[in-house]
Amino acid sequence: DVLSVAFSVDNRQIVSGSRDKTIKLWNTLAECKYTIQDEGHSDWVSCVRFSPNHTNPIIVSAGWDKVVK
C-alpha cells in the first residue's frame, strides 16, 4: 500500500512511500525509475516530499521507524 505521494516542482517526477518500506521515484508515464529499499527505512514510509529547489531537488522521507532521511 502506498502511504504518501508527492510531485516534483516541475511536475515531471513523482515520489512514493509505502508500507513495504520502499521509496520509489516515478516519471509521469507511471514508470518506476528508481527504488530505495535497503538503505531506506526499517518500517513503513509514511511521508515523502520533494524540496522546492527545482535545479537540485532533494527527496525527504519520514517513517514509522521515527527516522527522517
Image (spheres, rainbow, N blue to C red):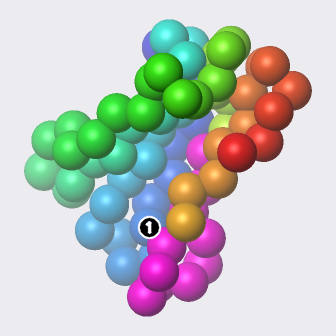
Residue 49 is left or right of residue 30, and the answer is right
- The quadrant in which residue 53 appears is bottom right
Residue most toward the right?
Answer: 66
Q: Residue at x 78, y 19 (%)?
A: 64
Q: How many marks?
A: 1
Provide residue 51's location: percent of width, then percent of height: 61, 70
Percent of width and height locating residue 52: 60, 78
Q: Name the residue that disc number 1 marks.
A: 8
Give the quarter of the figure containing the C terminus: top right
Q: Is residue 46 visible?
A: yes
Q: Amino acid at mark 1?
A: Ser
The kind of secondary structure the magenta stretch mainly shows is loop
Asked if residue 66 is among those painted magenta in the image, a careful observer would answer no
Q: Residue at x 50, y 11 (%)?
A: 20
Q: Is residue 4 left or right of residue 15?
A: right
x and y percent of residue 8 in the render? 44, 67
- Indicate whether 11 appears above or below 45: below
Residue 62 versus residue 11: which sits nearer the camera?
Answer: 62
Element carrying mark 1: loop
Identify whether 53 is placed above or below 2.
below
- Residue farthest toward the bottom in the current orientation of the protein: 55
Mark 1, residues whose alpha carbon is within 10 Å: few (<14), some, or many (≥20)?
some
Q: Which segment did they paint magenta?
A: 48-57
